[in-house]
Image (spheres, helix red, strand yellow):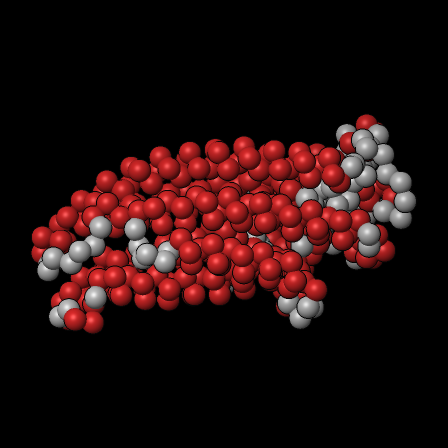
Amino acid sequence: MRYPSVGNVRPGKYKSLFDFLFGIRTGFGESGTTIHIAYAAATRARRNWILPGLLGLMTLAATLLLGIKGIEMPYLISRIILIDYLIFFFGWVCGWSAASRWRNDREFLEELVITNQRPAIIGNLLFAGYLSVWFRILVVMAVVEIIWCSFTTALNLDLLSRPAMDWFHVIVLGFLPMVVTISLLAWFHLETLRISYWMFAIPSLSQVSLRTRALVNLIITGFYVGILTGIGSVVTGVFSIFGALLFGLMGQAGPKVPLDHPTVGFFIGSIPGILVVISCKRFIVTLYETAFWRIYMLYCWYGAAEKVHPPAYPVSLQQHVQPWINFLQQEEAQIAAGLTKNDAAGAPAGGHSITP
């Protein structure tokens, strides 16, 4: 049987929208159910809601203040850029908190190692609590924001005194793009949080200084913010031109409603930009996940029960990591394709098992 090369391995299919959003791939096999159980259980623990809940309320308050005057250009630019900056920072805070939590709960990590789950499963389980809570918070924020923006826009345009045709015009050009954009922004922020948590997955296991790694992660976050903002701005700028043309054509065919022409074009054009940045964020998460696989296997091979781990693991262990990463990627691709375990590629010869 010919196995796919590492560079051609695809994540596989997803069983649901929830699985897709959280990266729970079909290649996880039955272990994907374990993650679902952990996500559901985490939402029932009150302590998991405290920090994300407070930060979510602050984010929602900032969002509503930006949109108090309705859908206008300053609101859109600030909403897409500034709020995501805020989410990046809040995600950094939560990721640091989560890593500190697992550093202080080594017994639980040792129990996870004994389960013989693959690294991708362990990484998702470590942050199941915060991410599952943030997902619900972002959904609530999106619903509140849609209601708030709809109300302020209707009030500013005095729609109650306008004929039905004006309402249709506003819904097609204003309301529908707004709902799509705000919904995508919830996903946009979820990917930001996934980056933040996976950034702290490695220091939650290794013995490097957590404060030092947190500072490094904050600096790296700044680079991500700058690069992703640049990519999103270019794509949005290009597609905003098409959005403005669409607005002009529809405006000529319908009644004259005082919608801001550049604003509607920007709203429509921002949708491709958001999707492109989301794709970039998911790629970044994939890189961090693979890096976690590496450190997790080294952590297991050195000894999960060891109280002290070296800042850098021995070369004799590190040289076996890449063959195992190749094997895990091939195995996941084969599980996603519906192959049996007997058909899977064999483990690397002369290496270690995933767990000690």
Q: Left or right: 353 with respect to 37?
A: right
**Residue at coordinates 75% horizontally, 40% vertically from top-left?**
210
Where does residue 144 sit, x and y in percent of width and height? Answer: 43, 65
Q: Which image quadrant for residue 137?
A: bottom right
Residue 12 appears in the picture as rendered: no
**Residue at coordinates 78% horizontally, 36% vertically from top-left?**
208
Residue nearer the viewer, 251 or 21: 251
Q: Name the image quarter holding the N terminus.
A: top right
Residue 255 appears in the picture as rendered: yes
Q: Left or right: 63 with respect to 298?
A: left
Q: Left or right: 336 with respect to 82?
A: right
Q: Is residue 11 above or below residue 173?
A: above
**Residue at coordinates 27% horizontally, 65% vertically from top-left?**
155
Q: What is the count of numbered marks?
A: 0
Q: Is residue 310 above or below residue 48?
A: above
Where does residue 157 sit, x and y in percent of width and height? Answer: 22, 62
**Residue at coordinates 78% horizontally, 37% vertically from top-left?**
209
Residue nearer the viewer, 328 or 190: 190
Outermost top residue: 315
Where does residue 333 sit, x and y in percent of width and height? Answer: 59, 48
Where does residue 221 sit, x and y in percent of width and height? Answer: 57, 37
